[in-house]
Amino acid sequence: MISTIEIENFKAFGKRTKIKLAPITLIFGENSSGKSTILQSLNLLKQTRESREAGAVLMPRADHGIVDLGSFQELLFDHNLKKDLSIKVGIDKYKINSALFNTYDIFKYNKEISIELVFSRPSIDEEVVLKRISIFAGDNQDCLVVFEPIQKIAKRARRELFMLYRRDRRALHSNFKFMKCSWVNKESKIWSQLYEKALAKKNDIVDYLLRIKKREGLDQNYLFEDEMTNVEYRDVYKSIIDDAIKFYRKQFTLDEYIQRMITIEANTIIGIDGFVPYGVTRDSEYPVPEEAFSRSTARISNDFTLDSGRLSVFAGRILEQALEMLFPLGPFRRPPERWYIFTGTSPQDVGYKGELLPDYLFRNPELVDDANTWLDKLGIGYRLKIQHLGPRVKDLFEVRLQDTRRTKAVEVGLSDVGFGISQILPFIVQSLASTDKILSIEQPEVHIHPKLQADLGDLLAEAIKEPRQNQFIIETHSEHLILRLQKLIRDGVMSHNDISVVYVSRHKSGAKAQQLIIDSNGDFLDDWPGGFFPERLRELI
């Protein structure tokens, strides 16, 4: 799913910081060191996309939102508007819609795609803008292409993007922007495989272009009477086709091929909906011969060009998919009530603050059974029971707990037991109900005792496996949780690659994140910075 997060000039983090994620990522650190900032970077993007404000570039705060981060200036490191805020998200192709990756030749041999979003606010009197989008690929994270804002584009390009927007039944809005390709990677390793395929298809391309030349009126799909006459259009387009035929008839070199492709890519325009690339066109009144050939073969994308525009749109789709899979739970879940009235709608989750948990359980009795199984495994000593308050009022119900430690069955209301039970229940239920989700949570150990903190490790180990295959990003202070996960590695229940432990510390230059490596025996190869957990030993001396 999400394999890396990189942030720069975001809250406590000044310098660019990369955080490697795993199926279970635990983020430790002292208070106010910047741990929550890592989770908030994803929450900020998700909140923006879920906002009712069409085309919002960035929404640090929203009514009933996930996070309240104040103004854009408060988001910036040192609150300095001269700095740019950068969030880069890496997504592993083997954990999220591999079929999409395989439509692009360049990702058949690379494990990861990353999209970096750079935001700025030129002055206190101006709005936040998306300053740059960069797309990266592969284990080495080579930057493939960069897009930057552009104010004016060709009429045909604008019309094509707007038509694409309408076909998708999306409403046009004033925040719909355009970006143009400003840089493309020229390294041979990026282009060599594409070059070989272009050589193999050169004769097919020439044959196709010759047929185009013979066809009356050339390509009518790109002809607009109000922009130029047919004769002018034919003359210019014939010149473009003749140049392409001349190029593909010769035995062109890799450098010649790269130069031609980069010239084509430089005219690529993408539409931007908020911070997500949407729609591709060219800043020209004329079609590109290579693209016309590719479309004639009914392929989704070119397999011998980088096709930077569609590549960026694809990266945007993958990012949106990851954000849809993200489910954040805040540090404090809503306290339980004495009784509830069913709203009449069936929630799909427990809610970002656990507020939908009662309705979720009310509508999903099988979840109550799953939760009770794990309440027994975790040794909590209670079993859940959803109980109607009367036969005449079916929508009025209460969440009850049956004390399993008593000889005689005793039931109590959820609001009558310790606060810790109500705080951990939403996390337990959501972990069991989710499939292929990214669950982030701050301090799941709040108000629960050490044994239960440790036992949560068993739940995490189960929830990352089939059939659930969830991913967890957890900010925590719990020594007991990490000790249990180390034991599970040692016992062979899970792999050391299933866990990433990150320690965040605060320095004069800003927060720093250090990954602490665990070996195959479950032992740390790195010392804990600042005696974070060994502090207990010092107290015993």
Image (tube, helix red, strand yellow):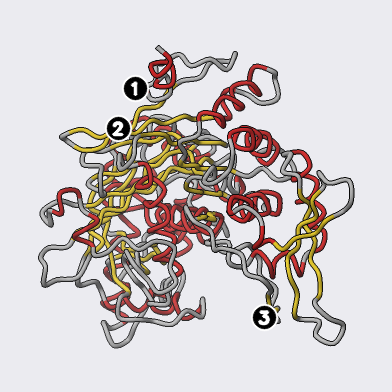
Give the residue type at disc 1.
Answer: Pro
Give the residue type at disc 2.
Answer: Ser
Residue 70 visible: yes
Q: Which residue is mark 3?
A: 343
Cβ atoms under marks 2 and 1 closer than 8 Å: yes
Real-space CA distance between mark 2 and mark 3, rounded to the nearest whole angstrom: 44 Å
- Pointer 2 or 1: first along the chain: 2
- Pointer 3 or 1: first along the chain: 3
Where residue 186 appears, x then y in whole percent? Answer: 28, 37
Quadrant where the N terminus sits is: top right
Q: Secondary structure at mark 1?
A: helix
Front residue (pair 152, 380): 380
Q: Which residue is mark 2?
A: 505
Q: Residue at x 51, y 79 (%)?
A: 167
Q: Which residue is mark 1?
A: 529
Above or below: residue 71 compared with residue 111: below
Above or below: residue 523 compared with residue 465: above
Q: Secondary structure at mark 2?
A: strand
Where residue 114 appears, x then y in whole percent? Answer: 41, 44
Quadrant where the C terminus sits is: top left
Q: Residues within 10 Å of mark 1 (few under 14, many from 20)?
A: some
Q: Residue at x 44, y 52 (%)?
A: 315
Give the residue type at disc 3.
Answer: Thr
Real-space CA distance between mark 3 and mark 1, rounded to the nearest whole angstrom: 49 Å
Residue 213 visible: no
Front residue (pair 87, 68): 68
Q: Would you say 41 lies left or right of 422 here?
A: left
